[in-house]
Amino acid sequence: MDGLEYMSGTLAHNWAGWGNQVHFKSQDLTRGHVTLKMSNTGARATDCAMNSSTCAEGGNWATKHFNGDTVNSINNGSLKHHLDIDYWFTKGASSLTISNVRMFGGQSFANSCRVASPI
């Protein structure tokens, strides 16, 4: 799952070429944060304004719905979520700083992921 991807000179959220790709909002291109929400049935991502603590629900989020086999594999524990930031083959000089990563999840997720906070 690419919560943040920088290919072809544009920042976007996508799912390895699948699902609904959404480009970053122009006002938040190089500042702000990315919110990625994953569940056993799919995932959503968007970028949010600088200094905001949450991203507004609704609007144009990149989305990916998992097929039944994937949902079953997640539910039985044989498939784990994997987060990637695709930042390669950029156009021109660039840099990326990642900081303040926070993970939240339901109690079973928080019990299995020591860095996650329960919601």
Image: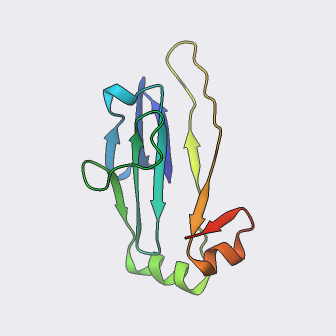
Q: In this view, does 112 lie to the left or right of 57?
A: right
Looking at this view, is 87 or 109 the one in front? 109
Residue drawn at x 47%, y 75% is 40
- The image quadrant of residue 64 is bottom left
Above or below: residue 14 compared with residue 25: below
Image location of residue 41, percent across then percent down: 41, 74
Q: Is residue 35 left or right of residue 18?
A: right
- The image quadrant of residue 13 is top left
Q: In this view, does 8 lie to the left or right of 99?
A: left
- The image quadrant of residue 58 is bottom left
Residue drawn at x 46%, y 70% is 39
Image location of residue 38, percent across then percent down: 47, 64
Q: Is residue 78 among the parts visible in the rendering?
A: no
Residue drawn at x 40%, y 40% is 48
Image location of residue 8, percent across then percent down: 42, 26
Which residue sits furthest bottom? 76
